[in-house]
Image: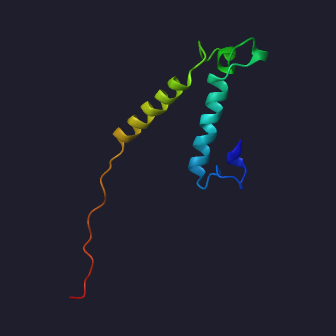
Amino acid sequence: MRRFTRLTNAFSKKLENHSLAVAMYFFHYNFCRVHGSLKKQTPAMAAGVADHAWTLEEMVELLEQEERAKIGTESNKRGPYKKSKSSD
């Protein structure tokens, strides 16, 4: 995974961005990618966590739902305005 290599253009500068990219990678690996050694199943299907192989569209929709829920609960208000002292 290129995010672990510092000398590439995919290097994560923030820990939060890196952890989210790794989470997306593992979600795709376990829920979307069909493995031949598991009799054409995903690891999530073999473990009984999922009943079908997820598509990328389903994965993106789940991420978008989570983002919409996050935006709806956060207050986007800024703090109180503080007047600066001017030397008039």
Residue plotted at (60% across, 52% down): 15
For the residue pair 62 and 69, the one nearer the viewer reads as 62
Where 65 falls versus 5 (above or below)? Answer: above
For this view, does 68 lie left or right of residue 63? left
The quarter of the displayed image where residue 41 is located: top right
Q: From the top left corner, tell me how far across and down residue 75 is, in percent.
A: 33, 47
Where 37 falls versus 1 (above or below)? Answer: above
For the residue pair 71 and 25, the one nearer the viewer reads as 25
Q: From the top left corner, tell me how far across and down residue 22 is, in percent.
A: 64, 40
Q: From the top left corner, tell me how far across and down residue 72 is, in percent.
A: 34, 39
* Quadrant holding the C terminus: bottom left
For this view, does 11 lie left or right of residue 38? left
The quarter of the displayed image where residue 56 is located: top right
Q: How many marks?
A: 0
Colour mapping used in the image: rainbow
Q: From the top left corner, tell me how far across and down residue 57 is, in percent.
A: 51, 25
* Quadrant holding the N terminus: top right
Furthest toward the bottom, the residue is 88
Furthest toward the left, the residue is 88
Residue plotted at (62% across, 23% down): 31
For this view, does 66 lie left or right of residue 31? left
Residue plotted at (64% across, 49% down): 10
